[in-house]
Amino acid sequence: MDDQAGDATAARLFVLLVGGALLIGGIAGFLYEADFGTGDGLVSDDIIGVFPTNGWDNLFHLIAGLACLAAASRAPREMALAIGALFTVAALWGLLATDRGVGSLAETIPVSTEDNLLHLAVGLTAIAAGLLGRSGRPAAPA
């Protein structure tokens, strides 16, 4: 294991844990709602009564989870930073797209205020994990 891979412990742990959670969440989401409608045909159901989901949302979580797990051994820091950027942008976009707590991204993925806050927490945690080295201090430039 090279120094860069050794320093990526926080990022590796993040992508493994969150990747697994995203994968499980994506699979479980299909049990709630599997419809791939868009626009006026957008259909969603709430996971545990809080987080809206549909086929597009589930697919997004499955792909993100698989990407995290695939990158855990080769590029965990880069994946943590990429997931961090993606989820932070999705959260901010979602906050702008919600009206009275509900909305959708590009008339495809349903979001709620709770969903957006969870995405923001995941995004910011991912960025922190990507920036931290094994010692818990910011990693030195590569």
Image (cartoon, rainbow, N blue to C red):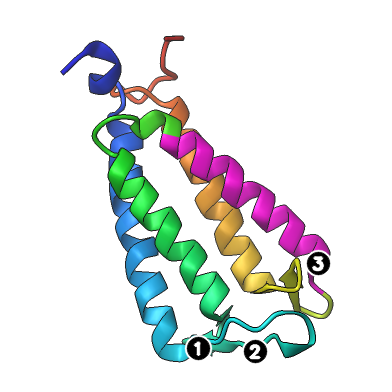
On screen, residue 76 above or below 24: above
Q: Report how far apart the C-alphas of labels 2 and 1 lie in the structure.
A: 8 Å
Task: Assess whether mark 1 and mark 2 are in contact (beta carbons under 8 angstroms).
Answer: yes
Q: Amino acid at mark 1?
A: Glu
Q: According to the image, label 3 marks what residue? A: 97
Q: Nearer the viewer, residue 28 or 11?
A: 28
Residue 63's quadrant in the figure?
bottom left
Q: Report how far apart the C-alphas of labels 2 and 3 lie in the structure.
A: 17 Å
The location of residue 57, given as percent across then percent down, is: 55, 71
Q: According to the image, label 1 marks what residue? A: 33
Specify few, some or many for label 1: CA neighbours under 10 Å numbering under 14, 14-19, or 20 or more. many
Residue drawn at point x = 68 percent, y = 48 percent:
89
The answer to whether 48 appears left or right of 27 in the picture is right
Q: Nearer the viewer, residue 90 or 35?
A: 35
Residue closest to the far left: 1
The disc, 2 or 3, on the residue closer to the chain's N-terminal end is 2
Q: Secondary structure at mark 3?
A: helix
Total labels: the figure holds: 3
Q: Amino acid at mark 2?
A: Val
Q: According to the image, label 2 marks what residue? A: 43
The answer to whether 110 appears left or right of 83 in the picture is right
Q: Main secondary structure of the magenta part?
A: helix
| Extent of the magenta region | 79-98
Specify few, some or many for label 2: CA neighbours under 10 Å numbering under 14, 14-19, or 20 or more. some
The disc, 3 or 1, on the residue closer to the chain's N-terminal end is 1
